[in-house]
Amino acid sequence: MDDSTPILVGAGQFIEKDVPPEKALPPVGIAGEAAKAALADSGIGDRLSRHIDTVVSIRIILDSTNRPRLEIPFGRAENPPRAVARRIGANPVSAIYGNVGGNTPQMYINEVAERISNKEIDVALIAGSEAIKTAQLALRSDLDLDWDEEDVGSMEDRGLGEELITPHEFSHGIGVPVQSYPLFENAFRAQQGNSIELHMQQLGALFEPFSKVAARNPFAFFGKQRSAEELITVTPENRFICFPYPKWMNAMDGVNQGAAVIMTSVGKAKELAINPQKWIFLHGSGEANDKLTMSKRVNYYSAPALKLNVRKALDMAGKKVDEIDYFDIYSCFPSAVEIACKELGLPYNDPRGLTVTGGLPFFGGPGNNYSLHAVAAMIPLLRADRTRFGLVTANGGYLSKHATGIYSATPWESKWRRENPAGYQREIDETPSPEFSEIPNGRATIETYTICFNKGVAERGIIVGRLADSGQRFVANTIVKPELLQGMMEKEQVGRTGTVSHFEGMNTFIPF
C-alpha cells in the first residue's frame, strides 16, 4: 500500500449532561475533550498532538446564520480551531473554521484525505461540538457565562457558505428546518400514494429502531427508547411542531456534545508507530449539491444529488449497497431518511439498520457536527471486524448539500484518489427547474404544504404551489382560520386547487 494513503487513526466523542451551567464547558471546551479522546484512541496519546499541522473546527450553530434564532450573550471563541488546538497542546500551521452545513464533517474528511494523499498535510484533527443545552439553561436562570477566548495565530474562516434560501422564501416560512422538512414529507407521502393515517404509522415504524439504538448509546443525549405508537401520538409533551411531525420526530439541538477524528497517512502512521489495528481507510467519498434554494428544486420527494454522490462514493470503493455492513443515514427528520432510502434502494426495515448513533432526534443534533459523531461511532465497529464496510451520509441545509464516506479497516491497495466533485456537479446543475414567480395571482394547485404550530396551536400553513395557467411555482401562506388548518391535516392537500394572490410582498393561498 502507498505511504501517501490517507487513514483515520483516532476518534473520540464527549457528552456533558447534568452539569450546572456555571461549571459546564463552552463549545470549544467540549470539542477539546473530544479531541483528547481521539488522541487517546490513537494509542499514542499526547505524543500525536505535537505532530498535528492542521486543525479543522466544524462551525458552531450560533455562528452559522445571519438570521440568529437565539441570541447568546456569553461571548465566543474568536479563533475556534486554535482554541481547540491549545487545549491539546497542538500548534498547527493551518487552522480552518468550517462553513455551514451538516454535510461539512464528511466534506472536510474528504478534503483532508485528498490533501494528505497529495502530501500537503501530515496530521489533521477535525473536531466539532455544541453547548446549546448549557446556553439554554443559563439563559433560563439568568446566569452570566464567559465564553470569550482569544487565541493568537492565523485562521482560515470558510464563512457561511452557499446561500440556501431567498428573502422571499424566508418571509413565507421556508428556511427554518422544522418548517421546511415537512414540505418534503407531505410531498413524499402524496407521491407514494399513502393515506395520512398509514403514512404516520410508517413514520413511527421508521424511527422506532433509531430510538432503540440511541437508548444503547452512552453518547446519546436523548437516549430513551420509544415505541412507534409513542412517536406518532400527539400529546402535550409530544405536541405538533409542523404537520406531520410531532416533537419527537424533529432533530433535537439542545445538546452538549462533541466529536473528533485524527487523520494522517500510512507513511506517517508507520513513522509514529501507530498500530495498524487502529487504521481506518476512506474507501469512497462523494459530494454533490441539489438545487440550493427550495424554490428551484426539481421536486420535493427526491434528492438527485444525494443519489449521485452516494453512487460516486460506491464506485470509488468498488462496492454496491448490498455489500455495505453498517449505515448511518442522516436523520434530522423522517423525510431525510425516507428520501435517502429511496435513492439508495434501502428498505426502511433493512436488517443492517440505518443508524449507528440513534439519529438526530434521539442521539441529538449537535448543529453542523452530527455526522462526525456518526464517523466516530462507525470506527470501533469496523475495527472489530476488518472485513466490514460502513457508509455515512451527511446532509446540509434542507436536503441541499450532500457528502458521503465509505469506511473500512480493509486496506486501500492502490494509489488513493477521488473524482473531483465539480465534474459531476454539472449533472445536477443542468437539470431544469420549474420557473418561479414571486408575484403569483390566479388559480393554482398545491404541490406541497405544511401546517405550523406555536405551543401546540396551529397558526399558519405554508404552501408551495403551481399556477394553473403557466405552471410557475410559488410559495404562499394560508389565511389563519382554525377550521381550515385543522382540515388540511385530516385530508390530503397535495393536488388541491384554489387561488393565490400577491399583496405587499406576501402571497396568500385560499383553497377551494
Image: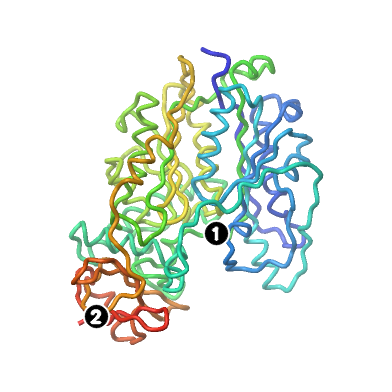
Q: Quadrant of residue 422?
A: top left
How far from the left and from the top, in percent, is residue 193?
18, 60
Q: Secondary structure at mark 2?
A: strand
How far from the left and from the top, in percent, is residue 256?
63, 54
Q: Amino acid at mark 1?
A: Asp
Please give left or right for residue 13 compared with residue 486 in the image.
Answer: right
Q: Amino acid at mark 2?
A: Thr
| Nearer to us: label 2 or label 1 | 2
Q: Quadrant of residue 67?
A: bottom right
Estimate the spatial distance between the alpha carbons at disc 2 and disc 1, rounded to whole Å: 37 Å
Q: Is 380 situated above or below 452?
A: above
Q: Is 51 situated above or below 503?
A: above
Can residue 325 be spotted in the picture?
yes
Q: Secondary structure at mark 1?
A: loop
Q: Which mark is residue 499?
A: 2
Where does the C terminus fall, quadrant-wise?
bottom left
Q: Which mark is residue 236?
A: none
Q: Which mark is residue 253?
A: 1
Q: How many marks?
A: 2
